[in-house]
Image (cartoon, rainbow, N blue to C red):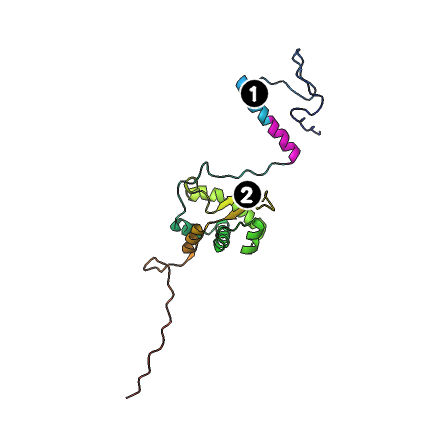
Amino acid sequence: MTVPAPPPYPPTTGWAPAPPTGTAPDGMVLVAVPLAYVPHVARLLAELDAGQRSGPPRTRIDSPPGPPVADWTVEDLRRLSRGRSATHRTVAAVLDALAAAPDRLFTVRDLAQATGRPRKKIVGAMAGLTRLLKAHYDYAGRGLPFARVDGRPEAPRELCYTVDARRAACWREARSPRTPESGFPEQPVPATAPGPAHPAS
């Protein structure tokens, strides 16, 4: 059985206040609402009507309830970079690309090209990242390890990802190897010029 779509609110044609007898117009139903909630209900109905006219709504971004209260430390980022799951590996590759070009806005297509991974892998990792951070990291306090912002002017509905210069430096440090003795990144050993040859006696 085909279920007819709900009528727009308020109806574009043929709308009139409910008759005094208490019967509703065709396609409508009378609902008792507390007077204080009437503006909220009207706004909700208007939003639902607008959503039906403009197509399916965009997926809600699952973000922390407020701005981060702490920053990602180098050690936090290092632990993230060493995760073994598919999400860990893809997010690490994404952060490598973002850190290579601080302040640049990357779309998912840009990240796929920069990391050599399919777009669906990038999208899947972004979808699973929040759950991973909530389970193993201080997501409520630190938020995401990168910034997620509205799209560029030529594609405002497409989300972009970026890191600033400070986060990029922290990530590069987190990715650098450390010597087991000192715990500090390995430093290249400068080449030494050969000394003068001594004549055999």
Q: Is residue 49 above or below residue 164?
A: above
* First along the sequence among labels 1 and 2: 1
Residue identified by numbered label 1: 38
Name of the residue lying farthest toward the top = 21
Tally the marks. Answer: 2
Q: Can residue 41 be seen at all in this image of the molecule?
A: yes
* Rendered image: mark on residue 71: none
Q: Secondary structure at mark 2?
A: loop
**Near-viewer residue (111 or 128):** 111
Please, which residue is most extreme toward the bottom here? 201
Residue in the image at 65% along x and 35% along y: 54
Per the model, the C-alpha gap separating discs 1 and 2 is: 33 Å
Among the 4 quarters of the image, the one containing residue 37? top right
Neighbour tally class for label 1: few under 14, some 14-19, many 20 plus, Cα within 10 Å: few
Residue at the spot 35% in from the left edge and 77% down from the top edge = 194
- Estimate the x, y position of residue 193 in percent, counting from the top left: 36, 75
Q: Please name which of the two marks, 1 or 2, marks the residue nearer to the observer.
A: 2
| Horizontal and vertical percent position of residue 23 | 67, 14
Residue at image point 53% right, 39% down: 61
For badge 1, the amino acid type reads Val
With 127 as the anchor, is 15 left or right in this view? right
Q: Nearer the viewer, residue 15 or 132?
A: 15
Quadrant location of the N terminus in the rendered image: top right
Q: Amino acid at mark 2?
A: Asp
Secondary structure character of the magenta stretch overall = helix
Among the 4 quarters of the image, the one containing residue 137 = top left
Residue under pointer 2: 150
Magenta residue span: 45-55
